[in-house]
Amino acid sequence: MQSADGRDTENHIHEAAALRTLNAFAIDLIAIPNIDDLFWYVAKKVVGHLNFVDCVIYQADDNQTVLTQVAALGEKNPYGRSIVNPLKIPFGEGITGQVAQNKQPVVVDDLLKNQNYIPDTQPARSEICVPLIIRGRVVGVIDSEHPRPGAFGEAELEVLTTIAAMTSAKLELLAEVARSTQQYHTLVQAHASLHTETVSRKALEAELFTARKLETVGRLTGRFAHDFNNLLTVISGNFELIEAEIVSPAAKECFGEAQAAAAQGAKLIRDMLAFAQRTRLEPKVVDLNLLVTAACDRSKQLLNGWLDIDLAPDLWSVKADPKLAEEAIYNLICNARDAAPKGERPIISTQNIRYNWADSDKLGCKLAQGPYVRVSVKDFGQGIPAQNLPQIFDPFYTTKPEGAGKGLGLSMVMGFMQQSGGGVSVESDVGFGTTIHLYFPAIAGSANDLLTMNR
């Protein structure tokens, strides 16, 4: 049948359907999100709507050596979007492999006369095969077979070539999006790594600055304390010589005040030497539970009995100067007393712990790996703001009212613990209180006891 202008009516209808399908494809291409969806869309909703009885789409590997079936239409694919045992065709083998290798489309009118035809489970008589090309590289092939000879002509080749070109353009766009996304993630990771490295470097610089500052202050403090201690020794010695000659009550009162001031000066010198880590230690094997008990007994009058004690049984032994260790614990108890509101009991506790390098962030201090005995003193006061925590161990730093403290208590504790091979850490929550932990290295026998207990 012919139309008024002499054209074949069936071909006219076919061309109109093809144009509608290609127009819809061009519009839908924008929204197709990935390669898998694209291949199945082309097979089912493009080629499938153009009177092709079957369609198989192959994707090439990155090395341009093998084609793998990724989508199909017709009797060759009865499983929806699932490909069971996908067909693989090496480049150069069969009609499809030659199209991939030569990058040229092919129309075969009679497959029985073509020596390159590889018979399928359902042999066909004619075939059309078009490559998918991006920047000179074959990325896939669209292939269709028909049971009737000469089923494909110039019209089908033109339509399928157009579909291949549109599909290749979308594949290139998806690849570019994937590359851009990967570059973005790489940039984000690089930025994150740079930020982490910068923060780490700044933290190390701050730590180094603090260490150098404390070392310098400690050196000056130690030298000053040594010279001032010599002066106090002379003063105290002279006091002893003239004490017997003082008979006036008023003079004795003044003399007593002078002796008390000299004693306070000597105590201050000892604290300064402890901060400077220049105290002459006399370490002994001690039970920290006994030292804690002694420090608590010493502070009973100070605290009016308001102190909770939680001592761990079977506490490991440590080697430390017992007098200075008790003094350090007593200092923490006094600080807890000053910080705790009325009615709230400070808590002092002991515990065996095993320190690993992975615990440094959690514990807040750096220690050698191994077993430790921890003494903790907790108050329920207002806590310490995070920005002030790094300062609390600085010499002469104090939050107490003027005249209530010299600011050497925690400095002395820190210096003594470091000189003893241990450490100090602080946990504080504003509004809920502060806990200070002392870490004493356990002696070798205690570590063996720990291993025995764990077996």
Image (cartoon, helix red, strand yellow):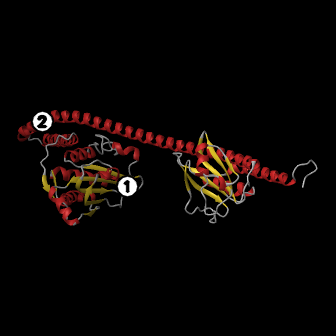
Q: Could you say which disc has been placed on residue 235 in the image?
A: 2
Label 2 SS = helix
Residue 241 x/y as whole percent: 5, 38
Residue 408, image x, y percentages: 26, 43
Quadrant in which the N terminus appears: bottom right
Helix, strand or loop at label 1? It is: strand
Q: Quadrant of the C terminus?
A: bottom left
In this rendering, does residue 90 appear at all? yes
Q: Which residue in the structure is indicated by mark 1?
A: 433
Q: Residues within 10 Å of mark 1 (few under 14, many from 20)?
A: many
Q: Residue at x 30, y 41 (%)?
A: 394
Q: As drawn, is 19 to the left or to the right of 41?
A: right
Q: Is residue 90 left or right of residue 390?
A: right
Residue 221 — which label?
none
Q: Nearer the viewer, residue 355 or 377?
A: 355
C-alpha gap between disc 1 and disc 2? 43 Å
Q: Quadrant of residue 398?
A: top left
| Amino acid under disc 2 | Ile
Rendered position, 93 above or below 254: below
> Which kind of residue does numbered mark 1 sit on?
Gly
- Res. 313 visible in picture: no
